[in-house]
Image (cartoon, grey):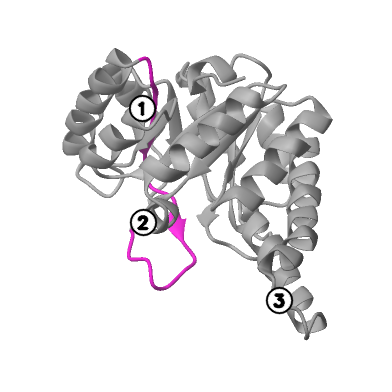
């Protein structure tokens, strides 16, 4: 069942969102969500759509969502381009994120308002970010800045976004679960902001902290690195073991199972 971000966030307290990079991991996530009876969000980030354009991967994910027995949202993650967002909307995405977190706040606000008007006119939900979640990858140049609760409530009210990503200590692309979460800051943001809150970089969060964030009312938990590690590490072992094999379809099942296991592990915590 294909639905929007705004709609899916009403289905349960917290929904897991996974960055996927093709058929193999996307279908593994959907099948796991169906097995668990959980709604789920399929996301594509900039790296993904640079490799597989929205016009190609979007309809594939939308078809998966429509055929799923559970609610599924198809979401464009971390886009800084109005043109890319327009392409995603035209390709069937039901949600987009405009990421102006690296811009001066007034410019972020103005651009986000423009995207909200554009997307809402098409029945598409919008997520934005206030403050900025940093990256552990040294190749990504991006400031990291904790979210100010007063700015967050002002930004959410002025833009009319459907979900708001906040920075409380998580870091994108962490391979080890060692992020230091500022739960007091999350509490102060939650007390002020009525808009559903999103946490990015959740692969680096300890399981108990992930559970605590959900209990505190976070609506969307973004995960990507943990799934990529499960897929890639398993694929490496499989290729090294199957030395006489050349058919890539024989390499994928083990990696797909690893993705399913990791998605189930995370959805169990979030659910």
Crowding near the residue tagged with mark 1, few <14, some 14–19, many ≥20 C-alpha atoms within 10 Å: few
Contact between marks 2 and 1 (CB within 8 A): the answer is no
Question: Residue 117's spot in the image, x, y percent?
Answer: 24, 18
Query: Residue at (78%, 57%) from the top-left corner?
Result: 258
Nearer-N-terminus badge (1/3): 1
Contact between marks 2 and 3 (CB within 8 A): the answer is no
User: What is the span of residues highlighted in magenta in the rendered image?
Assistant: 123-142
Up-down: is 195 above or below 104? above
Query: Residue at (36%, 56%) from the top-left corner?
Result: 50
Q: Which of 4 and 187 is in front in this view?
A: 4
Q: Which of 16 and 110 is in front in this view?
A: 16
Q: Mark 2 points at which residue?
A: 50
Tell me the distance, in whole angstroms, between the alpha carbons under discs 2 and 3. 24 Å
**Front of the two marks 2 and 1:** 2
Look at the numbered disc 2 and give the secondary structure of its residue.
helix
Nearer-N-terminus badge (2/3): 2
Q: Which of 146 and 49 is in front in this view?
A: 49
Crowding near the residue tagged with mark 2, few <14, some 14–19, many ≥20 C-alpha atoms within 10 Å: few
Based on the picture, tell me whether residue 131 belongs to the magenta stretch.
yes
Q: Nearer the viewer, residue 164 or 243?
A: 243
Tell me the distance, in whole angstroms, between the alpha carbons under discs 1 and 3. 47 Å
Look at the numbered disc 3 and give the secondary structure of its residue.
helix
Pick the quarter of the image with the N terminus.
Answer: top right
Q: Does the rendering let one see residue 153? A: yes
Up-down: is 210 above or below 123? below
Q: Name the residue under label 3.
A: 236
Q: Does the rendering let one see residue 202? A: no
């Amino acid at each position: 069942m294909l639905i929007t971000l705004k709609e899916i966030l009403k289905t349960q307290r917290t929904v897991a969102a996974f960055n996927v990079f093709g058929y193999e991991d996307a279908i593994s996530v959907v099948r796991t969500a169906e097995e668990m009876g959980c709604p789920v969000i399929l996301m594509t980030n900039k790296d993904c759509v640079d490799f597989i354009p929205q016009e190609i991967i979007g309809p594939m994910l939308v078809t998966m969502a429509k055929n799923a027995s559970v609610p599924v949202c198809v979401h464009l993650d971390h886009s800084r381009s109005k043109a890319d967002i327009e392409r995603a909307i035209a390709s069937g995405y039901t949600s987009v994120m405009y990421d102006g977190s690296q811009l001066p706040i007034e410019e972020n606000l103005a651009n986000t308002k423009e995207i909200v008007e554009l997307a809402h006119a098409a029945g598409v939900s919008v997520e934005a970010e206030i403050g900025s979640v940093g990256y552990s990858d040294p190749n990504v140049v991006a400031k990291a800045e904790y979210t100010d609760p007063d700015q967050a409530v002002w930004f959410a009210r002025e833009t009319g976004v459907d979900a708001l990503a906040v920075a409380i200590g998580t870091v994108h692309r962490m391979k080890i679960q060692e992020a230091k979460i500022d739960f007091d800051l999350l509490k102060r943001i939650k007390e002020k902001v009525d808009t559903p809150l999103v946490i990015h970089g959740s692969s680096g969060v300890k399981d108990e902290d992930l559970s605590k964030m959900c209990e505190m009312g976070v609506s969307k938990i973004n995960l990507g690195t943990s799934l990529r590690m499960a897929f890639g590490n398993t694929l490496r072992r499989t290729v090294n073991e199957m030395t006489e094999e050349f058919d890539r379809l024989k390499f994928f099942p083990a990696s797909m199972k690893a993705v399913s296991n990791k998605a189930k592990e995370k959805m169990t915590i979030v659910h």
